[in-house]
Image (tube, grey):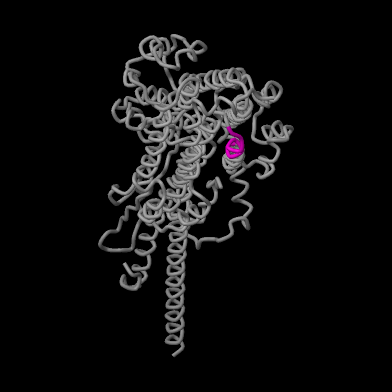
Amino acid sequence: MEEQEVNQSCENGRRNGEAEQEEDSALQFLDSIDSYLCLMDSLSSTLREGWLELASARHSMGISRITNVLLDLKPHSAATTIKVSSHVFESSSTEDPMVRQPHITLSKWSSFKDGKGCFGEAVAGEEEFKNKSQNPQLRHRNPSQFPEFQEAHTSSEGASLSADDEAKKERTKSLSVFGTLVSPKLRAAQHSFESVLEILVEIANKRSLLVWDALGMEDDGVPWWVLGW
Amino acid sequence: MYGFEALTFNVHSGYLEAIVRGYRSGLLTAADYNNLCQCENLDDIKLHLSATEYGPYLQNEPSPLHTTTIVEKCTLKLVDEYKHMLCQATEPLSTFLEYITYGHMIDNVVLIVTGTLHERDVHELLEKCHPLGMFDSIATLAVAQNMRELYRLVLVDTPLAPYFSECITSEDLDDMNIEIMRNTLYKAYLEDFYRFCQKLGGATAEIMSDLLAFEADRRAINITINSIGTELTRDDRRKLYSNFGLLCPYGHEELAVCEDIDQVRAVVEKYPPYQSIFAKMSYGETQMLDKAFYEEEVKRLCLAFEQQFHYAVFFAYVRLREQEIRNVMWISECVAQNQKSRVHDSVVFIF
């Protein structure tokens, strides 16, 4: 009798643990969707702002100074590149025990002198991804509550100064097709479109994580049609 | 004290002054702009403009319209009016009218040279040139490799030839050299126009001196702001400022060493006519600077019509039309991008 009660209480504990795990997965998934939708809104507003700033620059500098016929057709290397990598994770699924999750890293204003690329920003993106994937957590809406994030940021500031100078030179060089003395409005438009690139890469990675979270929920027994896929 | 222009002006230029004053009455009013600002799409803009003097130029344009098409057709109207005045003008008014177009000629030369440097086709570059700045041998600009060849092969037979004496070098044309060439040519043009107007004397000299001095000062401020953070040295920047204007010479000395917008503001605010311009903006901001300058320019251009018997009305009319075309372009862009809330960021009302 006592043995039966012990077995029953163990069974109840296991079920409660599974239920909590399912709830955590569902909350994580909803959190990911929320951040994905926020990114889409941010993309739309930043893109609109960029196009209007470009129109404002044309209005300020004149239509003959900002026109598509001035774009350079000479062969030149890309100023910004993306790197797609795959991270392999173990899955409890019997169909595919090794799951490959793609991750995109953006390298802005890569310097291709001497055949070497400058991937300072890309390295930071990869480390963040590895930490997140090994220790999945609910998204925190107010990162300023965590001082360790701020300390890590300030320690990397000194190393990024030379990369900033290089990026500034590359930005100026890419705008030089419209002339060397361009309006601050054109620089603002360039900055907006640069932000759009970053958001697009974030969206792509977020979608990849959404698929990962959805697979996690399926493993927990939540049917795929509940997820709306 | 003016000469006796009232006795002799109308003999040669009375008809054209009447024509230009008639053209001025056709400029868009605040009511027209309010209607345009409420349009939902570019076809609505075309509909509203068809009730104005732009109607005949836009009525045959098929949908869907683009903002560049609207701007091109509005510019065609200005060109037709200018050519009508030029073919009726006698000296010295004809020379004065030609001076008005030299700025566009400089822009076209730089467009062709820059586009050729970027391996673009000459024909597509010619399509983008401003019609007021066209001249016969403009397509030949594409063969020049440096400024010496540019001058020797093409520009020696154009009105821009005298302006090249300060920038003839054998250095290859690159982005920085082209920019310096553009600004050096424009500086020489403004100074030459200023001297010409001074020679004409009377009300023309007085009013045009004020308008050209404002233009020179605005250019100096824009060059300073646009060169902040670039490779342009202080000496090179100083060389691009014109040798006349309210800011010359002490303001120019201070502008040459400015490193940010707030320093520029501190320099320019010492001059009362420009204090009101920067008073409209907050510190560190440059977004509204263009609009503030355009508003001040429009105010001065409208004042030119308050006097008679001078040539400045022709200059003022062309500049007011160009401002109107900029307004229509901005409104069209805001409507096309569905950002009508931002339409009043850059529209400058003329009346």
Q: Could you say where residue A33 lies in the image, as x and y percent from the top left?
A: 43, 63
Q: Quadrant of residue A142?
A: bottom right
Question: Considering only vertical position in the picture, is A55 above or below B186?
Answer: below
Q: At 64% from the left edge and 53% from the top edge, which residue is drawn? A: A147
Q: Could you say where residue B33 lies in the image, as x and y percent from the top left?
A: 49, 52
Q: Could you say where residue B280 lies in the image, as x and y percent from the top left?
A: 66, 45
Q: Which residues are magenta?
A: B301-308
Question: Considering only vertical position in the picture, is B336 above or below B179?
Answer: below
In this rendering, position of residue A129 left or right of residue B3:
left
In this rendering, position of residue A44 left or right of residue B198:
left
Q: Is residue B165 magenta?
A: no
Q: Nearer the viewer, residue A160 or B351?
A: B351
Residue A57 seen in render: no
Query: Which quarter of the rendered picture does the N terminus of chain B lie within?
Result: top right
Q: Nearer the viewer, residue B346 or A210?
A: B346
In this rendering, position of residue B312 left or right of residue A77:
right
Q: At 60% from the left edge and 28% from the top edge, which residue is drawn? A: B6
Q: Nearer the viewer, residue B242 or B258?
A: B242
Question: Considering only vertical position in the picture, is B104 above or below A197?
Answer: above
Q: Could you say where residue A114 lies in the image, as x and y percent from the top left?
A: 40, 23
Q: Quadrant of residue B250?
A: top right
Residue B290 seen in render: yes
Q: Give the number of marks.
A: 0
Q: At 34% from the left edge and 68% from the top edge, which residue is drawn? A: A218
| Residue farthest toward the bottom in the current orientation of the protein | A1
